[in-house]
Image: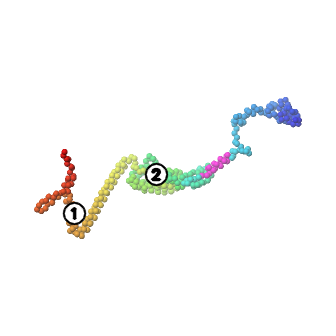
């Protein structure tokens, strides 16, 4: 149509493309054909061909200037990126996880600034702090009874007794945390301090006992009580935050180098104790018999004071009966001699004699 620009040509009045190369005249006002090559004149941009368009694409899509595949975050409907939303969500989750602390019953926790400076203490329940690493939380079970064995397995610990003898002694310390803040910050190594104080208290307690009382177990209860009291007093003076629940002596043996000699001494001591016990039993029997004879004599004397002649004759008859019943007797009467036939003695001899073999 006349008066209108041809979209495929550059002229204003013709129906076909103007110019020799079909690209439109240089003075035309119509748009250039994007599918036709440029005129080759300087300063003119050459339009991209279909081969150029497909060469700029790869299997993954359009290539970047460096040749590698491009990556873009997904965009929201309004054209903005999801990256700030993702970062904000991660930060919110991190703050919630590291700021809420559930302290179980029997536990306590210590809060510190950046893992160093003490802030405050947390008790059982739900507690809130600043997120990590601004504030850090360390939990401990303060009700759990912990055990420390001294000196450990297969280790000999020799302790001097009050009578200058050595014993190999091992014991057990039961303790728990009484104040978590003091336990964490008062002493540099509270567990090692506990062991050192325990050893000093045990040596002092054993030094007040003799070897026999330590080996036989008579003084163990007293030693355990003394050690516990001494340890607790020293730990309280140091403000260690430790409570000693008890001391238990596991083993008390002589040193290994003189163990055989100690066994011999122990065996001899046991034999001596057995002999002493037998002698005491015999002494008790003799004493009981003597006391019975004394009471019998008192009774006879009381009867003698009432009837002296009758009591004297009765004693004479009883004494003669005891004497004559144990001997063979012959009774001699005046004028004639009558032999006495001891029938009980003959009967006893007949029973004691071996039986005679019967003839065939």
Q: Which residues are magenta?
A: 86-101
**Quadrant (top left/top right/bottom left/bottom right) for the C terminus:** top left
**Residue at position x 33%, y 53% in the image:** 274
Residue that extends furthest to the top in the rendered view of this protein: 20
Label total for image: 2
Left or right of 251? Residue 71 is: right
Separation (CA) of disc 2 from disc 1: 72 Å
Observer-nearest of 290 and 87: 290
Q: Which residue is mark 1?
A: 318
Label 2 residue SS: strand
Magenta-colored stretch includes residue 240 = no
User: Are there few (<14), some (14-19), or many (20+) residues within 10 Å of tag 2?
Assistant: some
Observer-nearest of 9 and 145: 9
Helix, strand or loop for the magenta stretch, by majority: helix
Which of the two discs, 2 and 1, labels the residue nearer the N terminus? 2
Magenta-colored stretch includes residue 99 = yes
**Residue at position x 83%, y 30% in the image:** 21
User: Residue 190, labelled with which disc?
Assistant: none
Q: Position of residue 211 (x, y in %)?
A: 39, 53
Quarter of image, res 316: bottom left
**Residue at position x 63%, y 48% in the image:** 94
**Viewer can see residue 131:** no
Q: Which residue is mark 2?
A: 172
Q: Position of residue 108 (x, y in %)?
A: 56, 54
Quarter of image, res 83: top right
Circles 2 and 1 in contact, beta carbons < 8 Å: no
Residue that extends furthest to the bottom in the rendered view of this protein: 306
Vertically, is 5 above or below 203? above
Observer-nearest of 353 and 115: 353
Left or right of 233? Residue 93 is: right
């Amino acid at each position: 149509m006349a008066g209108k620009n041809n979209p495929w040509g550059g002229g204003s009045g013709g129906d076909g493309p103007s110019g020799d190369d079909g690209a439109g005249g240089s003075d035309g006002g119509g748009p250039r054909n994007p599918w036709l090559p440029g005129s080759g004149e300087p300063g003119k941009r050459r339009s991209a061909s279909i081969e150029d368009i497909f060469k700029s694409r790869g299997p993954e899509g359009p290539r970047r200037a460096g040749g590698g595949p491009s990556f873009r975050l997904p965009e929201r409907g309004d054209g903005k990126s999801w990256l700030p939303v993702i970062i904000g969500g991660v930060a919110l989750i991190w703050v919630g996880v590291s700021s809420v602390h559930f302290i179980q019953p029997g536990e306590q926790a210590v809060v510190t600034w950046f893992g160093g400076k003490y802030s405050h203490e947390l008790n059982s329940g739900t507690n809130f702090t600043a997120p990590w690493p601004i504030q850090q939380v360390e939990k401990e079970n303060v009700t759990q009874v912990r055990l420390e064995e001294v000196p450990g397995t297969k280790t000999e610990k020799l302790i001097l007794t009050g009578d200058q003898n050595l014993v190999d002694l091992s014991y057990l310390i039961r303790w728990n945390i009484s104040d978590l803040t003091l336990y964490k910050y008062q002493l540099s190594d509270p567990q090692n301090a506990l062991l050192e104080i325990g050893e000093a208290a045990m040596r002092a307690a054993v030094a007040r006992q003799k070897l026999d009382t330590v080996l036989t177990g008579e003084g163990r209860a007293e030693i355990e009580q003394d050690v516990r009291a001494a340890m607790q007093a020293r730990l309280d003076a140091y403000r260690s935050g430790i409570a000693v629940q008890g001391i238990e002596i596991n083993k008390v043996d002589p040193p290994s180098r003189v163990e055989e000699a100690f066994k011999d001494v122990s065996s001899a001591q046991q034999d001596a104790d057995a002999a002493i016990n037998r002698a005491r039993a015999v002494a008790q029997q003799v004493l009981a018999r003597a006391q019975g004879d004394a009471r019998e004599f008192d009774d006879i004397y009381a009867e003698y004071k009432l009837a002296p002649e009758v009591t004297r004759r009765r004693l004479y008859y009883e004494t003669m009966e005891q004497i004559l019943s144990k001997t063979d007797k012959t009774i001699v009467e005046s004028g004639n001699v009558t032999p006495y036939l001891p029938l009980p003695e003959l009967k006893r001899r007949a029973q004691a004699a071996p039986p005679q073999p019967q003839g065939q």
